[in-house]
Amino acid sequence: MAENPQKLVFVDDLEVWVIGKPRIKNISLRVQPPDGRIEVSVPRIGFAFCDGEVTRFVRSKRAWIDRAVQKTKSSPMAQAEGASKEEVKAWRQVVEACVPALVEAWEPILGVKAGQLAYRNMRSRWGSCQPTTGRICINVRLALFPPECLEYVVVHELCHLRVAGHGPAFYVLMDSVMPDWKKRRAKLK
């Protein structure tokens, strides 16, 4: 059996992907960006016998699903999927204009020095940092979000110059320099 077997089922007019997972006990539901794919996770042991239970569960959550799909499909990340080269270029210009000033403002606060700054149109990451070289890459799609989101990502990546991973020390540092970082991050979802 595959590690996480999947199958497509139809519940009324909805396409629902059922995913059998080995380490869960309860059924759960997610609407995945950018296209609003509906996924229901079920315990793998009951994977072959769950269609009726999945149908009842999905129908009971229909109002929530409709709202979540609409929100996901109208999100900036969903809109970015169909962007033209000109739109991406415009986002890049906005982000490239803002990031150096943010880096310059935050470097002394964090006691770090960034290396090369890079900008890319990325589907799944907001930024990245190579602590050994100091290179920081920022997603140009951040131009579609409020400015505080861009600042959050810049600070997040700069913090990696002090703490490489996402362990407790990293989040202690984030909390100490940007107490509202969780609110800012939530706007990116």
Image (cartoon, rainbow, N blue to C red):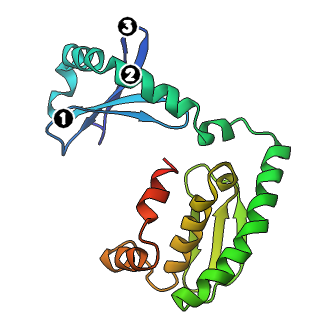
Q: Which mark is residue 16?
A: 2
Pointer 1 residue:
43
Q: Amino acid at mark 1?
A: Pro
Task: Answer few, some or many: residues within 10 Å of disc 1's Cα (few below 14, many 20 plus, some between 14 and 19).
Answer: some
Q: Amino acid at mark 3?
A: Asp
Residue 136 screen position, x and y as percent: 63, 74
Q: Which mark is residue 12?
A: 3
Quarter where residue 151 is shown? bottom right
Residue 49 screen position, x and y as percent: 17, 19
Look at 54% across and 92% down and name the residue there: 111
Cα separation, mark 1 vs mark 2, equals 16 Å
Q: How many numbered circles does the render carry?
A: 3
Q: Which mark is residue 160?
A: none
Left or right, 146 with respect to 72, comes to right
Question: Helix, strand, or loop for circle 2?
Answer: strand
Residue 117 screen position, x and y as percent: 71, 75
Nearest the eye: 184 or 56 = 184
Question: Helix, strand, or loop for circle 1?
Answer: strand
Look at 34% across and 80% down and name the residue there: 169
Left or right, 173 with respect to 100, comes to left
Residue 124 screen position, x and y as percent: 55, 51
Q: Amino acid at mark 2?
A: Val
| Viewer-side label of 1, 3 | 3
Q: On the rendered image, what quadrant is the N terminus found in?
A: top left
Q: Taking 17 as reference, is 129 above or below it?
A: below
